[in-house]
Image: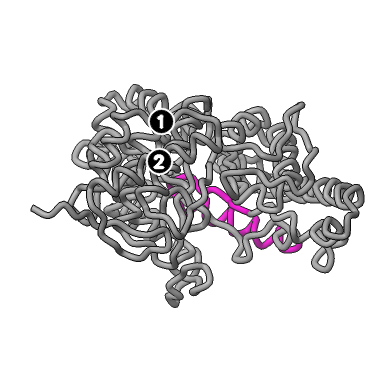
Amino acid sequence: MSVAHIMSAGMCGMRTAGDLVAWMQLKRGMKINDAKKYVAGKLGISMMDLSNEDVMARVREKLDIGTVCAEPDGAKGIVAKSRIARILGIEINSVNKFNAKLNAPFK
Amino acid sequence: MTDQILVRIGDGERISMSAKEVKEDILAGTQDAADRGQIPELTSEELDTLFEIFADPNRTVSVVPGNEVITTDDGASGIMCVDRPDGGTGLPMGYFNAVLAYERVCCADTAGIGHYDYSCKPVKSIINYEKQRVYAYNQALTIPVIYGTQPNLGLYYQPDGPFPNAAELIPQGKIEEAKKAQEDAAQALTEDLVFIAKELNEVGCDGFNFDTAGSAGDADLYATLKAIEKIKEIAPDMGIEIGMASEFVLGMHGSIEYNGKRLAGMYPHEQVKVCEEAGADIFGCAVNVNASESTPWNLARAVTFVKATTAVANIPVHPNVGMGVCGVPMVEMPPIDSVTRAAKSLVEIGKADGL
């Protein structure tokens, strides 16, 4: 049933810009059009292309922010999220936790 | 050309109705919602659009390009590895692989995870295991991971919990005792919810979903709202979603107020405002399904409530669209024709920001 909802009305996550728009709803409480406008502005593409696989596959690959078709050396998971946080200009808890560990001084 | 349109009953049974009957049910559904919620009915143009969605002869329907929205869920990826009582498929795979498949194969926008039991109370005693899971999942997933749990005040009453059982006291006429028990239990629930969120925040939890809030009535919702307030102070970078248990807040207590507003009897367009005040980032409304009425009746009703809610909301609204909610039939395997019609209607007429 979840998949039916995703295919009928969802942005489709990493296939497009779904996760990026989701971050803006979760982090800033943005309504859908505001969130899409914000992300489209950051990516330099039209709002319509946010859910266009043809455009977003190339954008994601170029920015190295994770794609569903696996690249052996492509960013995924926390690395991709770290790059997304920088692009969107937001604080992501899990990324901050990761960076704090990565950059912590040796005792 | 036949005048008959294939639709469903709220229990999932397929029936055929004439165009006139579908239109009559759509009108009756919106009128029922408007009457109960004291909200506007759908306009004639919206009624026509909803009819066209039902009259579409294709098995599935979808939003037009550009109208896509965000999906959040209550641990839907778990369906791959849990079993029948949760609508699961029981595949011999772990939760971790299921969540990854949900991200990269199902292509969800966010991934909800949670403890198998899903209620807040059992999570407290195994919080370290849940912290490990949240940390590990966050390393591997690119999409936002949202930890979900049901407040479930019912577990705080005897015999499951320490407080006198309000549902037993009320029939005995012990109203004041029942109110006191609910207030005490609510305080304990708030403390547990804050404890869990605070612990998960320590490992970088990105989102917390209070799912099925208000299931035990107004005290349950009150406890959740108070928890959200405190969590927003402790963990301002953790996004918070709240999903409701039903369209109407049950007045098990009856007098509980949040910031001067009585919670009992609130409908979705009122619920969203108190959730905003508490600090929620996403609101999930739940509109009940009548299993004896048709999907045109049920969906018209749901869309009417959702439209009234999105009209006043300052935060994104994600209607709950699981089994038996917001126009989706109350059945173990909701038919895909009804599921996609609910999705399209709630987004394009109800103006939902997500599902």
Q: Quadrant of residue B123?
A: bottom right
- Of A32 and B207, nearer the camera is A32
**Residue type, label 1:** Ile
Segment tinted magenta in the rendering: B125-149
Residue B67, relative to residue B298: is it above or below? above
Position in image of residue B168 (x %, y %): 83, 62
Q: Which residue is mark 1?
A: A32
**Residue type, label 2:** Ile
- Residue A101 visible here: no
Position in image of residue A21 (x %, y %): 40, 34
Parent chain of label 1: A
Residue B210, relative to residue B233: is it above or below? below
Residue B346 relative to residue B114: left or right:
left
Residue B251 relative to residue B25: left or right:
right
Q: Which residue is mark 2?
A: B70
Tag 1's secondary structure?
helix
